[in-house]
Amino acid sequence: MTATTTDLPPEAIPYLEAVRTRLAVVPVDERDELLDDVSAQLREVQAESPVPLRERLGPPNRYAAELMSSAGYEMPAATSAATASVTTRLRRWWATSDLAQSLRRTIPQVAPGWWVLRPFLIAAGVLAFVGGARLADEPPSQFMALLAGAIGVTTSIRWGRSSRRAPDRVLTIAALVGILVAYNAMQALPRYEFVNSGLDWAEPGLHHDDGTPISNIYAYDVEGNPVTVFLYDQDGRPIDQLADPLEPGRIVDTEYELDSSGQPMLNLFPRRVVGVGPGTNGMTESTVAPPAADIPATTTTSTATPTTTVPPTASPG
Amino acid sequence: METTQLLKGVLDLAVLAVLADDDGYGYDVVRRLRDTGLDEVGEASVYGTLRRLFQAGALTSYVVPSDEGPHRKYYGLNETGRERLTQFTATWRSFADVLDRLTKEVA
């Protein structure tokens, strides 16, 4: 509600404005009330006598000073806006600006929603802090969770509505801390990123973490001798789903060795990959050469014996 | 000068007393104070005092629309205000007594 300047005599308007600027430190609502009274008085004073306002009431800054001190406000005096500390300016802005005023009006409207949301944020923070894994081991029963939720929300609402500010503030701060903690914990989680190296679609077969397909496996014993192996996983299943081999500029294909019953041995490694492509004498067919492998040097002189013995005729499909 | 200093201390009491008589709007209160003899009182002081007393919960405030012009904001005493007036008056009386006794020899 701004003081009405509409029915003020024209000379009174600058006087009122001058007083208004000097009331800058007064909170907006109070300031408007004061100015309301002042403008009413200016109207009457003008109507009473033709003596100019400045003579009649004194200079606006003296008027404003008297107004402020009798209303119980401290005059800013030497504390100009520029020299005030950041916190002081912030507080002053919060008390006097129009934006802050509309913020203050909105806060009571969203408060109830915040009260309901708070306990969940606090819970999220607590969970993130103690580690979700602990709860995964012994998840609280649904009933317990509901009970805790009901208690949390009721308490939050009750404290929000009570006139004592302290418990309400504590909850709000706890909720904000909870957000921070939960966010932090989420950032620290191992990221399961779908790294794409141009192969976005679900490529079948083995891949490295960075997306590079694995189309063949070369095995060497600990003395560095290449060996031919059958590969099986931890459950005894043959490892045979590799990516299709690719060679730039050539058409390649895998040729599988056949077992004694004529079935291709898909988990026998290294696989034989044959390529057709331009060569020195037109199209040539050649086996893809084994790659250079950096085999670590070991100090063991004895060959490591596999602990799982799997019959070589296990079905390779 | 002394009057102004003294006035600062008792303006609350004066304003409360005026309003106890009858509700009033800002400039009205100023006029009544001046009529009773407080011609040194400044309008700004009265308005500030009215707002402060209102903020302290001692006054009620209401707006009366008027035909010949804009609305007027009236102030009046409420229960708290009346209590405050009574207490303040008692304090004033005893204070005045003490001062009287102290200055008995002067003039």
Image (cartoon, coloured by chain):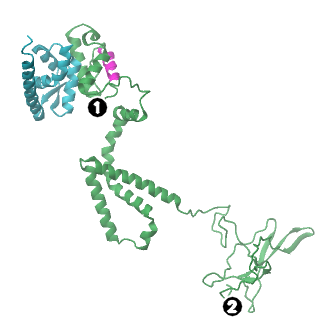
Chain colours: A green, B cyan
Report the residue marked by disc 1: A29
Where residue A310 sits in the image (x, y, percent)?
Answer: 67, 89
Measuring 65% from the left and 66% from the top, which residue is drawn there? A209
Report the residue marked by disc 2: A311
Q: Magenta segment range?
A: A12-22
Where residue A132 sits in the image (x, y, percent)?
Answer: 45, 66
| Direction from residue A125 to residue A15 in the image, left or right | left
Where residue A111 sits in the image (x, y, percent)?
Answer: 32, 48
Q: Earlier in the sequence, mark 2 or mark 1?
A: 1
Residue A68 or A41: which is nearer the viewer?
A68
Measuring 33% from the left and 39% from the top, which residue is drawn there? A104
Image height check: is A109 above or below A149?
Answer: above
- Secondary structure of residue under mark 2: loop
- Report the amino acid beneath label 2: Pro
- Secondary structure of residue under mark 1: helix
Residue A113 appears in view: no
